[in-house]
Image (spheres, coloured by chain):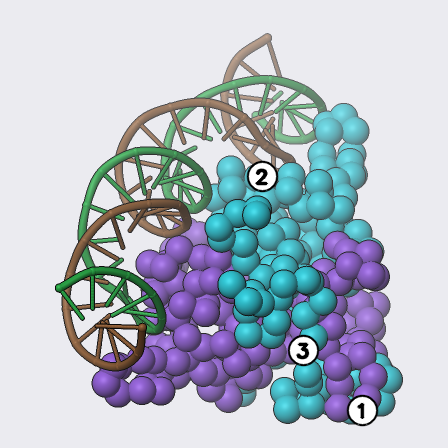
Chain colours: A purple, B cyan, C green, D brown
DNA sequence: TCCATCAGTTTGAAAATCAAACCCTCCTTT
DNA sequence: AAAGGAGGGTTTGATTTTCAAACTGATGGA
């Protein structure tokens, strides 16, 4: 008998509560590229400075970024991804691949990523156990939260 | 001599312009689970009905969802992912895996996905060419847009 | 001394979000 | 026939966010 409107418990929603606000993932993009200074972020992302400051605080609080001084006198700061932040990079790469595929012609892609194997990175999500690419038809979802089915809240 | 503030051209930003608004990826989660009806979406996502209607229009316009009648008389509709929409599923799965890893204890994960290989899905992003897992240190970014370097706008 | 850089904060106006109520069509029950 | 009820939204008015631009404050250079 909790609330009248509780959404499906879900790690996607939980993750988006931390990084789903406007600009947050672009901040992560920039810090993963090595651009962790405030003015760089403002320029490269195009976000209002106050919003950016709010996002940075939130990402630091969430343990996704750290703030370190790269100079005392004058005090100057730089944001860097934590391990948890770096582990969000696959989300960025997957989004980028999708945007490249669906939003751009092949010869007008804004950025190309090169992989250490020497080729352009073509990312594929795979199952770590069997190694196969993850396809929609091969998945079955099992809600674990009591009172929830794959369709929605159980009973009524 | 365009604008004074143009952000980095980037497929991540382009993709997020379509699916980065609040609730959009949760809509996609539900339609991928097979829950495409308006009231299901409202219940399972917990979004205001008007916002949801706006998001659905936008996602249909973007070619990520389709709206189909599952009943004439009374007219009733259902949203389904297009091919492009389905291709965003890896983004959701990767976000979910991150949330599971960083936001929950192993035994309180809200949902478990089973893969056709018989095991619980543990997704890994890999390079399609060499098959290796994608690690941050193995990547090199090459901006293609004129006037842009990995650090930011070229020159000044 | 005057100007510039960096890392933000402040301000006030414009836009988006929210919960709740409402609407319309059809269907079922009484 | 009347009264619900479900589905798929729209409308309303109050609350939050976002935004661009201006400002701050410390430091360093010309």
Quadrant location, the N terminus of chain A: bottom left
Residue B24 relative to residue A70: left or right: right
Q: Are marks 3 and 1 on the same chain?
A: no
**Decide: marks 3, 1 in contact (CB < 8 A)?**
no
| Residue count near mark 3 (Cα–Cα under 10 Å), binned few <14, some 14–19, many ≥20 | some
Which residue matches tag 3? B141
* Residue at the image position 73 percent from the left and 29 percent from the top: B75
* C-alpha gap between disc 3 and disc 2: 38 Å
Q: Residue at x 39, y 70 (%)?
A: A38
Nearer the camera: disc 3 or disc 1: 3
Q: Is residue D3 left or right of residue C13?
A: right
**Residue D2 or residue A144, whichever sits in front:** A144
Rendered location of residue A8, percent (x, y): 53, 62
- Secondary structure at badge 3 equals strand
Is there any visible trace of residue B9 in the rendered image?
Answer: yes
Image height check: is A18 above or below C22? below
Q: Which residue is mark 1?
A: A117
Residue A17 visible here: no
Q: Residues within 10 Å of mark 1 (few under 14, many from 20)?
A: some
User: Secondary structure beneath disc 1?
Assistant: loop
Q: Could you say whether the residue bearing mark 2 is in a helix, strand or loop?
A: helix
- Residue A86 figure quarter: bottom right
Q: CA distance from mark 2 to mark 1?
A: 45 Å
Q: Chain of mark 1?
A: A
**Chain letter of the residue carrying label 2:** B
Query: Which residue is rendered at x = 63% and y = 51% of the image?
Result: B18
């Amino acid at each position: 008998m909790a609330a009248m409107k509780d959404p499906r418990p879900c790690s996607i929603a939980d993750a988006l509560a931390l990084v789903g606000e406007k600009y947050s993932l672009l901040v992560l993009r920039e810090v993963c590229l090595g651009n962790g200074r405030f003015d760089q972020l403002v320029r490269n992302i195009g976000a209002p400075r106050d919003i950016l400051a709010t996002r940075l605080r939130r990402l630091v609080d969430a343990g996704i970024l750290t703030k370190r001084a790269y100079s005392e006198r004058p005090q100057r700061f730089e944001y860097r991804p934590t391990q948890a932040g770096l582990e969000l990079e696959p989300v960025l790469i997957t989004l980028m691949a999708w945007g490249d595929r669906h939003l751009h012609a092949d010869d007008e892609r804004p950025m190309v990523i090169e992989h250490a194997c020497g080729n352009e990175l073509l990312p594929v999500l795979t199952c770590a156990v069997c190694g196969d690419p993850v396809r929609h038809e091969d998945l079955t979802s099992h809600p674990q939260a009591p009172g929830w089915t794959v369709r929605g809240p159980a009973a009524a």
